[in-house]
Amino acid sequence: MHEQKSASSVPAKRSDGPQILSRDKHPVSRQHISSNALKVLYRLNKGGFDAYLVGGGVRDIMLGLAPKDFDIATNATPEQIKALFRNCRLIGRRFRLAHIVFGRDIIEVATFRGHHDGNSPQASCAKTSKQSEHGMLLRDNIYGSIEEDAERRDFTINALYYSVANFNVYDFANGVEDIKQRKIRLIGDPETRYREDPVRMLRAIRFATKLDMTISKETAAPIIALAPLLDNIPPARLFEEFLKLFLSGKALENFHMLRQYELFRYFFPVVDEALEQQSLLYLPAFLEQAFNNTDERINNDKRVTPAFLFAALLWYPIQQQIKVLKQTSSLTPQDAFFTAYGEVMARQQQSIAIPKRFQTVIKDILILQERLTRRDGKRAYRAFEHPKFRAGYDFLLLRHQVESAQGNNDLAELTDWWTEFQQRNYETQQQMIKSLARSKPSTRRTPRKRRRSPRNNKPQH
Ligand code: ATP
Ligand code: MG
């Protein structure tokens, strides 16, 4: 057994080779591994290559968890992998990978990565290796040995390799000990590793919450200072990371930890600003509740959409912007909404690229907040039949829950009305709409006023 490292970081190179755990010294068995992953491992071995289950697959089994997916590392090149499997697709630019496709199940196979030390002929070739001015790896297609591959991985607990040829687990970076100690520890010098790939800062947090572990002191130390490196991450990649952080059942914990490490602002600059300045009264409790509900739904196997969370994050900042616009211009309420929405969203998109299909739903949920207040005539039914009614109604409930907890009951009548409306038959619903008109004559006047407004006043968005 290797002694526990007391130095400030795990050495990048080990001369003494991996720690080898034979079958009786670890809990990883083939029963835990999907039959497709096993097929790939056996086929590679049969083809004369080394092949290992690696990363989250081994780590999670060691922790008694069910792995989310199975990643495989091999000394076969992507072309050699392709030659072995008919169902193989080569993908990726930054990391060239093989996907072995079994219907909806995809097994990812990566060739061992090597070092970018500039000494190898491969490393000096821009096609295989590329680094940005900030030390970020833009391309990482240099192949190497299993030892080098282990050193290129992010955390010690992610550098465990399991072989179906001899059932050993190979531990290159003291990951087994860190699993026991429940420590998230970067391999190599933390600052260099974060500079190579700033997303590792987010991964440190994600694994800490997901696995209920703590980030080691040395691995945590540089994060706040290096956080601005996340500005260089393409918005599309940050969107992927957002999904992993906020739609895997640990949104609330990840939110708090991202805030603590000053990383949240790179996802939601407008929201972070408001939280820092404490300028939006209901925002903190609203986010807390939205993340909490999302976690609960995921942990109960209920469906969630990222659009709901985006809507929750942006609702109060948009309301704030509407107020600003109203002070400085004479926009109609509808135009003010669309303008504010456009402005806040434009700023948001610079950080995370939210795909169009989610943007449509976000907009629907937000627009419904206003539409749900107009219930006269046929309007209640039109809102009720809206494909996103349920999400809009849930969003309204959430707003009411948070605002009423702070003494504001403005939404009580509206939420109660909609809750009842959904449970009633057609006749009772009609009565509900009529009694609404009786109790609030002003709601009758509103539509007439709007109908008179000129056509070209319609939002151009
Ligand atoms: P999970 O799949 O449960 O989120 P995982 O550890 O399997 O966790 P993946 O993103 O699937 O994470 O990556 C598989 C493995 O690839 C990791 O365990 C790690 O060894 C390596 N890896 C992934 N991303 C990076 C990175 N940014 N830098 C270095 N190594 C990485
Ligand atoms: Mg994985």
Image: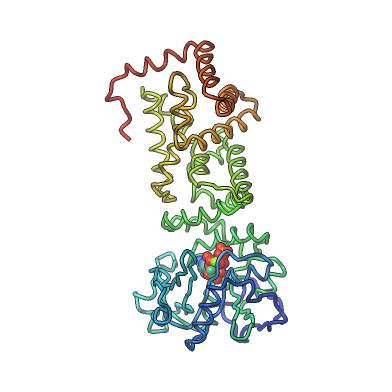
- Total numbered labels placed on residues in the image: 0
**Residue closest to the far left:** 456
Look at the image and tell me in which quarter the N terminus lies.
bottom right
What's the residue at 39%, 25% (across, down)? 328
Q: Is residue 444 above or below residue 249?
A: above
Q: In the shown orientation, is residue 71 left or right of residue 85?
A: right
Does residue 395 show up?
yes
The colour scheme applied to this rendered structure is rainbow
Quadrant of the picture in which ligand 1 is shown: bottom right
Does residue 192 show up?
no
Q: Is residue 357 above or below residue 79?
A: above
**Of 418 and 254, which appears nearest the observer?**
418
Q: Is residue 216 above or below residue 341?
A: below
Query: Residue 91: x, y in percent?
Result: 39, 69
Query: Residue 93: x, y in percent?
Result: 38, 69
**Of 235 and 263, which appears nearest the observer?**
235
Q: Quadrant of residue 386?
A: top left
Query: Residue 229: x, y in percent?
Result: 47, 58
What's the residue at 40%, 17% (across, down)? 447
What's the residue at 49%, 50% (across, down)? 267
Query: Residue 79: x, y in percent?
Result: 38, 80
Look at the image and tell me in which quarter the C terminus lies.
top left
Q: Is residue 89 above or below residue 75?
A: above
What's the residue at 59%, 74% (across, down)? 159
Q: Quadrant of residue 343?
A: top left
**Of 274 and 398, which appears nearest the observer?**
398
**Of 378 and 452, which appears nearest the observer?**
378
